[in-house]
Each structure stands twice: as structure tokens, then as C-alpha cells.
Amino acid sequence: MRRARRRGKKKSRGGLFIGFFLLLLLVTAAFVYSFPQFERVAPTVITPSKIVVGKSAVIPLRVSDNQALKSLQLFLRAGNKEYKVVDYNFAKGIKSKELKVTLPKDIIAKGIKSWDYEIILHDSSLWGFFLGNSAVKNGKLIIDNTPPAVSLIAKSPTILKGGSALVIYRVAEDNLKKSYIDIGEGIHFQAIPYKKKGVYATLIAWPFNQEKFNPKIVAIDGANNIATVPLKIRHIVKRYKTSYIAARDRFIDGKITQLASEDSDYASITDRLKKFKAVNELMRQKNEALIHRYSKRVTPFKDKWDIRVFYPLHGAKRVSDFGVRRYYYYKKRENIVSTSFHVGYDFASVKHDKIYSSVTGKVVFAANNGIYGNMPLIDHGFGLYTLYGHCSKIFIKKGESVNANQVIAQTGKSGLALGDHLHFGILVQGIEVYPLEWMNKKWIKDYILAVFQKADTKLGYN
């Protein structure tokens, strides 16, 4: 009897001990489970599945973790060959990292263009018996040292200083990153796909105030190999006029003061000449920056570009030329107080005359724009825009489509205008160009439409 009681007591004590031990294990497990060092979130390899490297032979790797990274290995394999290219240990506490790994020269020397890669990434968690969490990323590494092949298909025969031209060319490259025409001084003209794979087209311009014009076709592939091909196009230099205009007190106290008062940047200026210079130069720069921003986008066309002669104001007379450099003097001609360029044509007919959009397009801006007054700006596709300044009324709104020969506004004298007229401007990818070319039927036929026709013939469409 006594032995049975003793055995019962021993079992009871043993059960209590086991229960206590299990409880301790559960508490410990719960503690470990919730402790940050034992987190269970795997790290992330952000590197794309296909990596293309060029002459620099640099592989960009991006990795991250919610707590801290520990180590990274990069293996390259081709056939039965395997190489460990990277064995990297991260500094303590690093959550994300961008690595630029240069391929060893002996790997490049093997001449193998396509490799399978494997990235193994570990974090610093103590989970999994202190081994941490891991991620594996597999993909392709392409070594490409060959730049794209560029060939000209068709182009306008000449380009006028201040004028426009059309260029159509081919780029043989499966991994093309971007292509454009560089004319110098940091000015690029974006090219868009034209009809067949690898064929690109763009309008270009030679800014009227840029002396040197050295255009070249540029193509850059995914490995950052660059091909540059000089664009041989005959240059025609045009001399633009200069004019001297008196800045009279009546003009400054009237129109200039009115414009300055409407803009908080210039409203507090009281000195006459400082106010005139601020409006004529600084406000002009701000207004033209808006125009350039809205007119840089190149809207693609599906097949045929609907382009025709621009004739915005019927029966009008030209009262001011494009590209004129204006010198403003105060009281004496030698006392120049400000200067500016006139980047459009001024046309005048009768008061509040109808203004037409000769070509279909989409309105990208239709509001007041400082010295330009009430100003519609229309995108006609392919990087070509028309601008209509100093309007008394605008009949179209931003985002609307316009038809050919639609009345879009009325002439006026809003902005920096003394008499009722139209300031008509044309831009190619944000660059003001000589409007008379686009108002000339023969020029459009010989320098634009004929180039498309020649390209289509070469591409097998005619």
C-alpha cells in the first residue's frame, strides 16, 4: 500500500516536471518566434531575370531584406563549366544594397556570350537553427560587346538654319534601348518606330540661334553599346534680322506694368527699366519654358501622317518676321536696356479675325501664358506643334481634338501686344522653327512627303 502511494507520488512529480518542461519549451518557442533575430521573411533579389552587359562588363545586382543581409554568392554556368564570381559578406545591419560586379577577365576571355546565372542570398536571421532565411534567383547573363548597326534610309535634301528636316533610318539591334538624333549642344530629337521593325523616323530642327549644326544618329543597346553615325545633310545658312525698338514710358507704364502686376514674381518691381527688363526677358523665359515643356512629346502616328499647309489667318499680312533679334533702347538708341528674340511670325488682318487650325491635332494648352496672352498650343503628331498667341478669345479646350480648317480662336492684343494680331509659331520637339516652310506647299511636298515616299519604296510599300 505504502509502495503504491510512493509510486503515485513519483508519477505525480514526474508529470508536473514534464508539464513544466513543456510549458517552458512553449514559452521559449513563443519568445523565439516573436524575437526579431528569429524573423522568417526571406530576402529579396531585385535583379532582372535577363542581364545584358557590354564593354564595361559590369553586372548590376540589387538585393534587400526586412532586417539585415548577410551574404551573397553569384555563380555562372555554361555547359559543364561553373564559376563562383562573387562571394560577398554584407556589413552588419545593411538592409538593401546595390552591387556593381565587374566580370573577371578570364570569364570574358572564354568568348561565351550566354551564361546561366544563380544568385544565392542569405539574411542574418537566426531562424532555421541559426542558418537564416535564403533566396535563390536564376536567370540569363548575356555578354554583348557589339554596338547596333545603323543605316540611313531617306532624309530631306537640305536643312535651313532655323528650319526643319525629316530623317528615316534603320537600326539592326534586337536589344535596342533608345535611339535619337543628336544635333549638338545637348539637343536630341527622339525617333519613333516607322512601319517596319527596326525602322525609325523623326523630324529634326536646326535652332535659328545655334551656329554649329553637326547632326548624328545615335543608337544605344541594352548593354550600353553606342553607335553614332554622322548625318550628312546639306546646310543652308540664313541670316536673321535685327531691329531696334524704343521702350517708351507710356508703353512701360501701360502694357508692361499690367503684365508685371499679373505675376507675383514681378508685381513688386517699381523701377521702370528693371520692370521692363524683367517682363521682356525673365517673364518671356518662363512663358517659353512652358511652351517647350508642352511641345517636347512625340505623338506617334499609326500609318500615314496627316500633314498639309498651315494657313492660320486668311488674307492676312505679315507684320513681323521669325528669328528677329530685338534691341530695346531707352530715349537714346545707344542706351540698350533689354533684348529678346521673336520666335514666330506676326500676322494681322482685321480686328478679332478668325484663326484656323489647318491640320488635325490635339490641344495641349489653351489658357493665358504671360507675354503670349491667350494662347492655344496644338499637337499635330510626330513632334510638330503650332502656337497661336495674343488671342482675344479661345474656342477650344485642353484635351480636345481639332479638325482641319476648324476655327479655334480670334485675333487680339492679349499679352505683350499693342495692336490686334496673331503671333503664329511652329515647334519641332520643343524647338521653334521657321514657320514659312510649313506654310509652303512645295516645301512640304519636296522635303517631307517625298522623303516618306522614298522610304516607303525602299521598305517595299510602293
Image (spheres, rainbow, N blue to C red):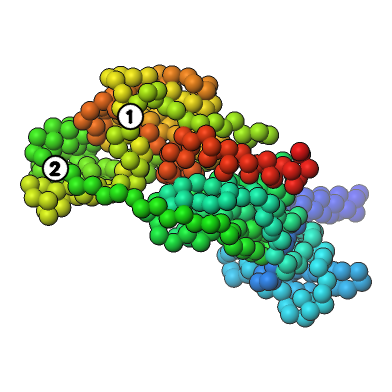
The answer to whether 236 appears left or right of 28 in the picture is: left
Q: CA distance from mark 1 to mark 2?
A: 25 Å
Q: Residue at x 30, y 38 (%)?
A: 320
State the residue in front, 297 or 390. Answer: 390
SS of the residue under disc 2: loop
Upstream in the sequence, badge 1 or badge 2?
Answer: 2
275 over 104 or under it: above or below:
above
Going by the numbered disc 2, the residue's amino acid type is Ala
* Residue 317 marker: 1
Residue 385, can we see it?
no
431 vs 271, nearest the viewer: 431
From the top left corner, tell me how far across and down residue 49 is, in percent.
Answer: 75, 55
Q: Give the residue number, with chain letter if any, for mark 2.
A: 247
At a point 46% along the width and 25% down the height, the residue shown is 357
- The three-letter code of the residue at mark 1 reads Lys
Query: Which corner quadrant holds the C terminus?
Result: top right
Q: Quadrant of residue 445?
A: top right
Mark 1 element type = strand
Residue sticking out furthest to the bottom: 106
